[in-house]
Amino acid sequence: MKRVRQTLKNSFVPHEGNDNKPTILRAQTIAFVAVIVLVAESAFVFGAKYIIPNSKLYGIIETNALVDETNAARVSNDLPALTVSPLLQEAAQEKANDEATKGYFAHTSPQGLTPWYWFENVGYSFDYAGENLAVNFSDSEDVTNAWLNSPEHRANIMSADFTQIGMATAQGTFNGQPTTYVVEEFGTPAAAPIAFVNAASAASIPTTAPQAPVVTKTTTKPATAKPATTTPKPVAVVPTIVAMQSSQTTSSQQSFVAVKGASTEAVNAETQVPSQATTASAVPSAPVAQSTFVQKLFSDPKALANDFYYLVMFIFFIALTLNIFVNVRVQYPRLIIGGLLVIVVAGLCVMLNQNINFLQAVIS
């Protein structure tokens, strides 16, 4: 223990024993640390651009982390956490696989399949449903932040109408570059079975100037009492896309899609049951974590890299403070400049990571 204290003293505190030159501020140490920081940043940039988009493990980690981040955002806004639905997980995976296989990024596929096609395909009947998409992200926290910073996508995440969530990723190519497609599906199971009508082309996305989203509400007729053994017949619905065009996108791009209820016509009005929407008055509960600590750590490589740079900056800030104030009469400008150089290099790496979009990340 005494040896450790002496090592720390020689490294950080100027005194006669180290000639008032702390080891950590000497030229050799400064050069070594600067090289480590630059190598770490190069590794991060290379991994974010080439390794992570092709990593199957990363896709699994990101899915779990994104569910946790979405629920954390809801709970912090006094909304109940969403439960993971195996059917929505399956629908999200099929949609992600379709995007990755065909190389498109849109709510409606080139073949005209709307988001609701994937809900129908897995047998998920809903009263309320929504979809958020992302592509070219290398960090799950960035995906969540991008959705939360978009009013339209945030509305999906914070909707009190949703009770369930499904998340999936798929590796593919987009615009000739390897990438990870992210699909987030929201839903509230239907109170009555739904038979989709022309789900592949039931809705069209507006391609005109930006406009406010229009909500289409479910219209139902009062239910008529039936014996308990009676099996309800499906309600025929035409899913209605509610879209908003972003002012920063071209007219052919979609920025957001959601459906609240559906345009409905009862096949048998006597068996139709009114939809049961969730309410914001539900008491928020602690969400069940989907990702482990290790998964969460490695699903946010940018945060991991930045934390390393913050640690380096903190260590050299302490070293500079001690060097300047412990022995005010003896100062070596080279030591101070060297310490400041490391802090500046690490700070620039943080700024680079925060402000540069390595992969032209997009949400929809």
Image (cartoon, rainbow, N blue to C red):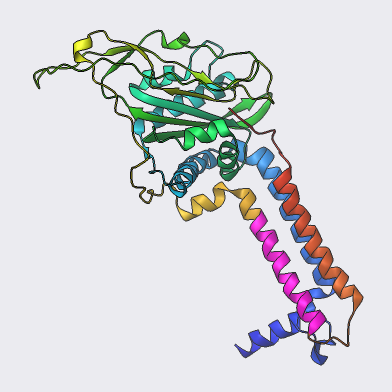
315 magenta-colored: yes
As rendered, which of 143 and 148 lies closer to the eye?
Answer: 148
Task: Give how far across and how far down residue 127 sits, in percent.
Answer: 34, 24
Magenta stretch, overall SS: helix
Residue 207, percent from left and from top:
62, 13
Q: From this viewpoint, is residue 198 visible? A: yes
Q: Is residue 113 left or right of residue 279?
A: right
Quadrant of the rendering where the C terminus is positioned: top right
Snapshot quadrant of residue 195? top left
Q: Magenta stretch containing residue 310, yes or no? A: yes
Residue 326 falls in which quadrant of the image?
bottom right
Q: Residue at x 69, y 82 (%)?
A: 8
Q: Quadrant of the N terminus?
A: bottom right
114 vs 86: above or below: above
Q: Is residue 22 visible?
A: no
Q: Which residues are magenta?
A: 306-325
Tell which of 132 and 273 is nearer to you.
273
The answer to which of 62 and 188 lies nearer the viewer is: 188
Q: Position of residue 107 (x, y in %)?
A: 53, 21
Residue 346: name its quadrant: bottom right
**Can you give x and y, in whole percent of width and height, for residue 174 in the image?**
64, 25
Relative to 121, is 179 on the left or the right?
right
- Give the answer, above or below, for where 271 lies relative to 157: above
- Residue at 83% over, 67% down: 340
Q: From the viewer's perspective, is 355 left or right of 329? A: left
- Residue at horizontal 81 percent and vertical 74 percent from the top: 25
- Tally of numbered discs: 0
